[in-house]
Amino acid sequence: MQALTSWFIRNPVAANLLMALILFLGAQTLFGIRIEGFPRIPPESVTVSITYPDATAEQVDELITQKVEQSLEGLEGVRSITSRSEAGLSTITVRRAGGQQLQQVLDRVRIRIDGLTDLPANARRPLIEASGFDFPALYVNLHGDADPATLQALAERLKEELLAQPELSRLNIWGLIPREMRIEIDPDRLRHYGLTLEDVTATIRQNSLNFEAGELRTNAGTIFLRADNRARYAPEYAALPVIERDNGAVVSVGDIATIHDGFVGGDFLFRLNGNPTVGMEILIGQKENLLDVSRVVRATVEDFSRQLPPQIQAEIWGDSAGYIADRLELLRSNGVQGLILVALMLSVFLNVRLALWVAMGIPISVMGAIAVAGSKWVDYSLNDVTTFGLIIALGILVDDAVVVGESVFEERHKEPDPIIGTERGVNQVAVATVFGVLTTIAAFFPMLLIDNPLGKALAAFSGIVILALIFSLIESKFILPAHLAHVPLTRRRRYLVTRLWARVQDGAQGGLSWFRDRIYAPVLVTSVRHRYGVLILFIAAILLGLGLMVKGKIKTVFFPDVPGQVITVNLEMDARAPFALTRANIDRIEAAANDLNAELAAETGMDSPPIKTIFTIINDAGSAQIFAELLPVAQRPKVPILDVVSAWRNRVGENGGAKLVHVSGGMVLLRAA
């Protein structure tokens, strides 16, 4: 390394080209790198879903789930098998063991499931897929005082317009209720015409199916022949002939029945701010940018809103783009502040130009890390984890550069030749700085080896820090010395500013010398003379810290619940609880939120209530959820989210038939149903 460092010192053009290349590649990658809220977690398990219509949870468990579990026993490469049986659906999750390829586990599961021959005849074909987790970008809801048919038709149109945008690839939609054509036969009219229920059923069945009659092959191609007598709407069903008399008179379905074109009834509810709603969950694709997705969705929804009737509104909520934009702004501001502080402190004690070149280690290291992280070989994105890693790394990036700069500064005062003085200064601290960076890398490296979903997400944190440290080492050993060798250390102070700054430097040097001679040196001598006492003192400090943790004075968590802008309420009911009781409980919890919202607005004098969106979901009688999004922190400085969570939790009270009511504030993770 010494020979390579000397070569760069004697060839400053090469050092400048290397620096320019790193900055250029980093900037180019920065403009094209994928931005998302949370790093993509690769699939870790295989999910088998089997639908069994009109079956209870007990029947599903006995006739499907247990048989599937038995067929998967002893499967190679499996860590665990979990299952869930509910009314009409069986879900079995097979998690791969460490070191196993998920595709191989998927193939083995598919072979076992295909070998099952004793499943109920009414059970649907098993759906086998690798189960990953897609983090949503934002949510779009259409809501208002309108009938379900209008909301669903508009939602389908909005979905088509969103998917037509090249920046978007996937979305999930919830709140769609299946349509139902209900035909109520009048028994008296049926007897009057001498018909049976089977006659009407056969007529409807014949006109509710479309079928292929064959194909006609020609020289120009193949023409498919289809007989299509399918009735789709209530008037078409009403016009279906049941009896055709010789005189031409026709008795239609509408003459003997009342036809209702509506929606399937069920134990579900979707409501936004008190109104019926249909919503969409916009997902981030493999190469999509969160900020671009948010921008395109907002523009599309704004254009679509102009076409909506007055009583229906389109609302966007749970947008992760604002959160990640704040993190990127924090990274930018921290980097600028760090660069300024490093340059200022070194300028006070050393040389201004030397300090500026040392501070350049921050942007060079960050840009180098981003250039490699965004490449196809590493494929990291800018997200919560990687930006947090870069923010942490900012504090240690210039450590080796500061040591090298100070050593070169001292040696150049002793050696008249700047090239030789720079070489001596770099070589004196080369071993210490290299091993200092390597030990830091070694501390972060084990996180890259964790083989589970959380470990793979956190691997991006350690990976980006390691990349930044490697580039800081490259900068301090090859780029920085080439610049320091050509920095003039002595120059006439012709201007008033330079003379004033020289006085500041002299005062700082005198203060540092006084601290070194009067405080640090005596403490150091005393510590060396009483080294065992100092050792016992530090051991006592360690034991004190451990004792505070054991006693709970210092709380520890593996993964903290970071406060966000969305409060989540999860309600789990007893399996025997009716839908009416579940709805009464969720209505009571939502009413408590509305009352709290009005009180907080009145107490703080806010123009708008702190809770701007309340989304209520009941998927079945056994569970319900509420998602309440608060205004941005800047608009509610006196209303912390944790205070709202605590106040809402205290107002929930007892709920009949409820097994669990959990209120938490953090990032929203809503799955479409």
Image (spheres, rainbow, N blue to C red):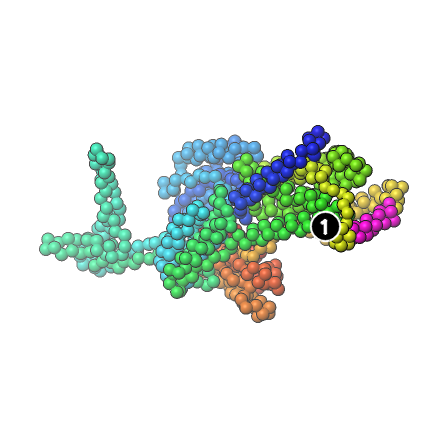
Q: Main secondary structure of the magenta part?
A: helix
Judged from the image, the secondary structure of the residue bearing numbered disc 1 is helix
Quadrant into which the N terminus falls: top right
Residue 30 coordinates in the image, percent (x, y): 55, 44
Would you say 614 lies left or right of 463 here? left
Magenta region, residue range: 501-521
Instruction: State the residue at coordinates (37%, 60%).
Output: 307
**Image location of residue 435, percent across then percent down:** 72, 35
On the question of residue 441 being in view, the answer is no
**In terms of depth relative to the viewer, which is nearer, 199 or 497?**
497
| Count of marks placed on residues | 1
Q: Against 300, is 527 above or below?
A: above
User: Horizontal and vertical percent for residue 535?
Assistant: 83, 42
Q: Give the left or right position of residue 9, taking residue 167 as reference.
A: right
Q: Amino acid at mark 1?
A: Leu
Compared to residue 101, the image places residue 356 above or below, namely below
Question: Could you tell me which residue is drawn at 57 percent across and 63 percent down?
Answer: 635
Q: Quadrant of residue 367?
A: top right
Residue 257 shown left or right of residue 66 in the figure? left
Up/down of 246 relative to 421, above or below: below
Please say whether residue 325 is visible from this viewpoint: yes
| Residue 171 against residue 594 in the figure, above or below | above
Q: Residue furthest top?
A: 3
The residue labelled by disc 1 is: 344
Task: From the top left corner, tell me how far across and down residue 504 is, in percent.
Answer: 78, 53
Magenta stretch contains residue 518: yes
Residue at the (22%, 58%) spot, across then down:
254
Closest to the observer, 305 or 224: 305
Picture residue at 61% right of the left edge, 50% below the top: 332
Q: Quadrant of residue 602?
A: bottom right
Please rate how many residues cluster around mark 1, counting C-alpha atoms within 10 Å: few if below 14, some from 14 to 19, many from 20: some
